[in-house]
Image: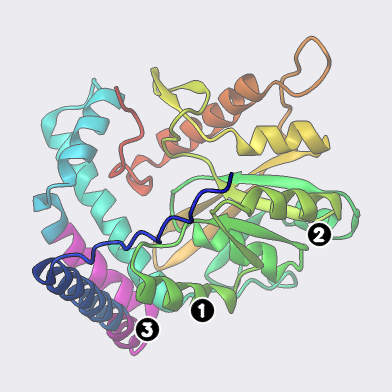
Amino acid sequence: MSHPAKPPVKRARPPLLHRIRAGLRHRLNAIGESIVGGYVRFSIWWLRLWPLSVSSGGMAFWAKLVGPFLPVTKVARRNLTAAFPEKSAAEINRMIRGIWANMGRLTADFAQQDRLWDYDPARPDAGRIEVVGAHILERLRTDDRPALFFTAHTGNWELCAIAGAKFDVPGGVLYRAPNNKKAADLIEEMRSETMPYLIRARRDAGRVMARMLSEGQHLGMLVDQYWTGGPEVMFFGRPCATNPTLARLARQFECPVHGMRVIRLPGARFRVEITEEIEMPRDGEGKIDVQAGMQVVTSVIETWVREYPEQWLWLHRRWRP
């Protein structure tokens, strides 16, 4: 026996006041995004009017003056005090000013990143860019094998990707876009002019990276930030969770892993350093051990940070309870 069809249930519309509030909130968010995006665009235009040495020095001055009073500085102070217990309060304060100076210089660098690269292999000491390990990039460019690069938020890390593009090493870089869509679109537009293929960190990123490695391409990624649920490694004597993607890809594709960093030098100059292949630990089956491999990578980064502590991004919460 058939039952009569039930009449469709009508969903009640949200109250008028609720709809007005939601619409107002959406419009305010859009206005806020436009203001931030416009400010970023204006700042880049302004900074491009000056020689890099002038804009870099100016931004370092203001960042060093204002940054120490911002709330996020509390994170840097806690991190530095725990990482360097032997340092006095005055030394920590000097380091904090140096960290903010580097952040200011980064802003100036980014505004002119299409003008930064002037490395000439025929005259390697003539420009603002030095490259240590250029022969490694030249070799990887033509060996038809995939490879992985890791780096950290130190110096001007964006130059790592630019170096790969300038040496014509086929591949891409994994990156995380800012939350503000207007700013994100502008930043991606600027990066696309100087960097290799950009892989946005989202659901399909793993599939894209796997495809590129299977084609013999090369990938670079930042691996020095907290990663929820990641394997635990020791960094400055303290446990922290890290992103395992690099070691997992190395395990899956049996490809070499190289470190790459940028050191900021006086006079708006930079040194790009590429390491030889990093030996990754193996498990009982002879495959790369993900946790142990990420510990090796993290230890390399720690040596970099200890060498130039003011050039690392201490402002993020690398260690969490």
To which residue does mark 2 refer? 138
Question: Which residue is more in the foreground, 131 or 3?
Answer: 3
Disc 2: CA contacts within 10 A as few (<14), some (14-19) or many (>=20) = some
To which residue does mark 3 refer? 51
Relative to 257, is 23 on the left or the right?
Answer: left
Three-letter code for the amino acid on which mark 2 is drawn? Glu
Magenta: main secondary structure: helix
- Front disc: 2 or 3: 2
Q: Earlier in the sequence, mark 2 or mark 3?
A: 3
> Which residue shows up at 62% across the image and 58% down it?
173
Q: Which mark is residue 189?
A: 1
- Front disc: 1 or 3: 1
Q: Residue furthest top?
A: 284
What quarter of the picture does the N terminus occupy?
Answer: top right
> Which residue shows up at 40% across the image and 60% down it?
7
Residue 16 at x, y percent in the picture: 12, 72
> In this picture, is 157 found above or below 194?
above
Relative to 209, is 221 on the left or the right?
Answer: left
Numbered circles on residues, count: 3
Gap between marks 1 and 2 measured at Cα: 27 Å
Three-letter code for the amino acid on which mark 3 is drawn? Pro
